[in-house]
Image: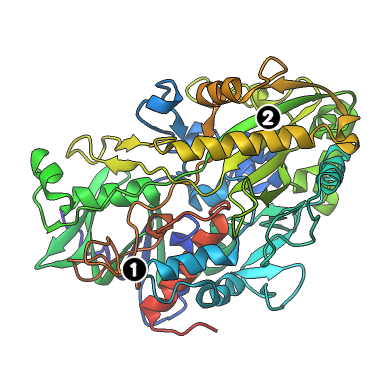
Amino acid sequence: MTDNRLSCDYLVVGSGAAGAVVAARLSEDPDVSVMLLEAGGRNDSLLLRVPGLGFAVANHPKFNWSFRADPVPEMEGRELTWLQGRVLGGSSSINGMIYARGHPREYDVWRQMGCAGWAFDDLLPYFRRSEANERGEGPWHGGSGPVTVRRARPGLPICDAFLEAAAEDGFPVLDDLNTDAGEGFAFYDINAGNGRRMSSATAYLEPAAGRPNLDIRTGALALRVVIEGGRASGVEASIGGRPVRIAARREVVLSAGAIKSPQLLMLSGIGPADALSALAVPVVHHAPNVGRNLQNHACYRLQYLCRGPVSGSRHLRLHNAVAAALRYALFRTGPLAETYAVAGGYFRTDPALEVPDAQVVLLSALGPATTGGAAFRIRDLLPDRHGFGMTVYQGSPFSRGAVSLRSADPLDRPRIEAGYFSDPRDMQVLVKAVKRMRAMMRRPAIAKHIDRELLPGETVSDDGSLEADIRRNGATAYHQCGTCAMGSRDDSVVDTELRVRGVESLRVADASIVPRIPNAALHAPAIMIGEKAAALIKGEDAD
């Protein structure tokens, strides 16, 4: 049905790291109306706002799509859960708050792949535009943007020992990982300020919420894009369980993420013609690469038991927990103002490489024993022993997967073929990276704190047994991207202005447009994509 009251100039689908930016920036023009649709609810829970509670929200089913990938042949047929935020702010409301860009050279590769205007020098102004970095305005950082960014300050002995061990192992210890440094370790920049998680909802939407020309709808599930005469004229959606059609006079912008955006395109008749016809979806435009080029960071977590209370587990002692709560309530500082992913770095597994191909993230306590679901309980996430973890990533994967439709039903979950280790080079890189980090843990600065290695454990002592354990216990980083990749070719899903080929007035602006995944978490790149998309729509030049 059509509800004539539901119309706007710009209709943005998805309020994640990119979509919230697009909606907020477009609504800066009082002469246009903007509607933002979010399938989840408001971001008003303390779990979503207090940085130190982030460990409890990432797996929470209330705020998550909790996608299930198909069994991965190269990982013993396991079905892995892919997390993605289903709440105002999207994944920026539930992630580890690491603010990392990756090496500038990785964006220059985008330009070499045919994406004119997307080299690092082209993108740096949009990174800077988004930031209010504690370092202040400078060549690498912005000082007055919406997102407060600062270095993590965990104040834990194990974190300092980790960086000291990196130095002993020959790595530079840096002040800032978001420059043109190659290999190096540091405390990460995090998107947190004044004791709050700086999600895109907090940073962009809350300041804009009072604008009369911005209509934010939660509980609004987009079902398909309405295409009339080769033009996107709106979206069919379910809002509060009621089917509606929302008209868009100027443009529809899909910012639903690397799983939902290609699903919406295919449900709307934009995708591989044979696959759509087989499901009785009327073909609007044959776009064979919709859903293809799926990329993600395969990873493996090392875990260590500590000799004493040097990790984040010390905060769980009753007197420490009470002190942390008081400190946060009074000053918005202390452990509750910090994230659990505090330090890490980038390194090469082959010295001949131009830029690092691996990344490690230090987790200041032992990982959870659950991954959510119907039996989700926060107390199950709390470690009962002193220890820490390190997540090691294959940062530049060669493997590719795909997203496709299971049926023509918009409520049916899409099919996800992860593709992990389908290219054997990825396993070779990850094995080398894990071995390097295990060796680093034998350096005196951190070895003195380690009682024993829990995972993989001393029985895993050669490359063959390590590879087997990665296949048995490896995981995903939830950095999915690439499924609506931009490019200059006619078969690219979107062009370099993010316009969907074959359909007018329709763009995609989220991590799905990434042609090649950077060796970094995708929160900062997704915000940058939102900033650039808004500027493209408004016809603005970079600063």
Q: Judge from the rendering whether residue 100 lies leftward or rightward of residue 335; answer left or right.
A: left
Give the label on residue 9, or none. Answer: none
User: Which element carries disc 2, helix, strand or loop?
Assistant: strand
Residue 465, position as x, y percentages in the image: 59, 20
Residue 345, position as x, y percentages in the image: 70, 50
Residue at mark 2 to residue at mark 1: CA–CA distance? 39 Å
How many numbered marks, from 0 up?
2
Q: Is residue 72 above or below residue 284?
A: above
Of pointers 2 and 1, the one earlier in the residue sequence = 2
Q: Which residue is mark 2?
A: 302
Give the label on residue 498, or none. Answer: 1
Residue 531, position as x, y percentages in the image: 49, 70
Residue in front for this viewpoint, 371 or 243: 371
Q: Is residue 224 above or below residue 535?
A: above
Residue 540: quarter of image: bottom left
Q: Is residue 18 above or below residue 314?
A: below
Residue type, numbered disc 1: Leu
Q: Residues within 10 Å of mark 2 (few under 14, many from 20)?
A: many
Q: Which residue is drawn at the image coordinates 68% and 70% (left, top)? A: 132
Residue in front for this viewpoint, 542 or 149: 542
